[in-house]
Image (cartoon, helix red, strand yellow):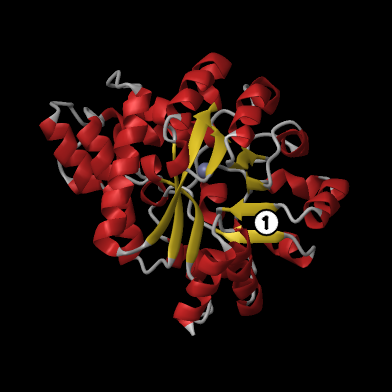
């Protein structure tokens, strides 16, 4: 990676990135029986080791991180710790995303209050570290269109504290078409749109995210590689691709790093970037993705630097903020 360019993560789930120690602490505090009571006995239940059969099996690893969110203070804590960890990792800017309905579920919290708590935790983290952070709200497809409306309302109540709206979860069984109205309201609220697509679903799912939901960035977008017309469209319209190399291997979205289309995306002139997805679940950090995963996917130093430049281009920041990030590295 190029030390003269900002070190940026555009795709990181704060509810997929809870410290193991925090899971233990919160489990104790809220009397939630965990499958392990030390870091090492808990780790295999939370962290992926190797390749899972598919995305949904991989997503099950999120279970314990969410099960321990016993109150709003817990939500605030994990948000704050995500900012602290991003700073400790050496990031210059991070966009953190979360699904309040998903976080609220196991302990029957109120999704609106979950959003308030996350916004407060991010503000605390910012004040403590000075790190530049933006927040993205997620609608979880997995719970259907009705729950999606509750989730959307919860996010809209804090609209000024969010920069974008995302759609995540079970892409196969809950297509973009179910969420057209949700995303129209998100755009009307002034949010940018990024959508998880082309991960468990095919190129058609990416087209739907672009044409039905108004996405200008795509989370993953791996299956775009199957559709030459889509590749051209992504380039012409400067649509961003938030790539997560290790996550894509672990969810069996690609059969290995060498088969990952990232290098071909960059060769096609697409705005593809390198991100983490869920660092604790994957057992990685952004440095690992740049230093280990990207070379394993065949990227040269020049291509890795291009991915860094692409992240700055795509960041949900003003031109002034982007210049300031660059100037700080010079
Ligand atoms: Zn993701």
Picture coordinates of residue 47, whole percent (x, y): 36, 45
Taking the image as shown, residue 330 lies to the left or right of residue 184, namely left
The local secondary structure at tag 1 comes to helix
Taking the image as shown, residue 32 lies to the left or right of residue 250, namely left
Identify which residue is drawn at 13% across, 26% down: 31
Identify which residue is drawn at 61% across, 28% down: 185
Q: Nearer the viewer, residue 200 or 286?
A: 286
Among all residues in the image, which is located at the extreme top?
146
Picture coordinates of residue 130, whole percent (x, y): 32, 64
Taking the image as shown, residue 49 lies to the left or right of residue 145, namely left
Q: Nearer the viewer, residue 329 or 247?
A: 329
Picture coordinates of residue 67, whole percent (x, y): 28, 28
Q: Report which quarter residue 46 is drawn in.
A: top left
Placement of 5 over or under 148, stated as above or below: below
- CB of residue at label 1: within 8 Å of ligand 1? no
Placement of 173 over or under 39, stated as above or below: above
Among all residues in the image, which is located at the extreme right?
229
Give the residue at mark 1: 259
Q: Nearer the viewer, residue 115 or 53?
A: 115
How many numbered circles are shown?
A: 1
Identify which residue is drawn at 55% across, 38% down: 165
Q: Is residue 208 visible?
A: yes
Q: Nearer the viewer, residue 258 or 217?
A: 217
Q: Circle 1: is it few (<14), some (14-19), or many (20+) Cα within 10 Å?
A: few
Taking the image as shown, residue 259 lies to the left or right of residue 120, namely right
Q: Is residue 42 visible?
A: no
Picture coordinates of residue 241, whole percent (x, y): 65, 53
């Amino acid at each position: 990676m190029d030390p003269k360019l900002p070190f940026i993560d555009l795709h990181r789930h704060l509810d997929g990135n809870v410290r193991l120690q925090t899971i233990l602490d919160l489990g104790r505090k809220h009397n939630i029986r965990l499958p392990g009571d030390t870091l090492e006995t808990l780790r295999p239940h939370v962290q992926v080791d190797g390749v899972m059969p598919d995305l949904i099996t991989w997503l099950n690893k999120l279970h314990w991180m969410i099960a321990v969110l016993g109150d709003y203070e817990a939500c605030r804590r994990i948000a704050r710790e995500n900012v602290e960890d991003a700073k400790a990792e050496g990031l210059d800017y991070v966009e953190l995303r979360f699904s309040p309905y998903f976080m609220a579920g196991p302990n029957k919290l109120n999704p609106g209050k979950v959003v308030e708590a996350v916004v407060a935790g991010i503000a605390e983290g910012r004040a403590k570290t000075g790190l530049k952070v933006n927040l993205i709200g997620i609608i979880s497809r997995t719970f259907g269109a009705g729950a999606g409306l509750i989730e959307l309302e919860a996010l809209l109540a804090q609209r000024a504290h969010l920069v974008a709206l995302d759609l995540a979860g079970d892409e196969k069984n809950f297509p973009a078409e179910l969420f057209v109205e949700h995303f129209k309201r998100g755009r009307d609220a002034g949010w940018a749109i990024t959508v998880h697509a082309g991960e468990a679903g095919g190129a058609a799912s990416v087209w739907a995210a672009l044409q039905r939901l108004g996405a200008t960035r795509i989370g993953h977008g791996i299956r775009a590689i199957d559709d030459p017309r889509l590749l051209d469209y992504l380039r012409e319209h400067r649509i961003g691709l938030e790539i997560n190399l290790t996550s894509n291997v672990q969810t069996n979205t690609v059969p290995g790093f060498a088969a990952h289309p990232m290098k071909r995306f960059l060769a096609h002139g697409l705005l593809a970037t390198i991100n983490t997805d869920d660092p604790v679940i994957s057992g990685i950090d952004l440095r690992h993705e740049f230093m280990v995963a990207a070379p394993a996917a065949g990227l040269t130093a020049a291509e890795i630097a291009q991915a860094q430049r692409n992240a700055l281009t795509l960041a949900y920041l003003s031109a002034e903020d982007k210049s300031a990030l660059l100037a700080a590295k010079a």
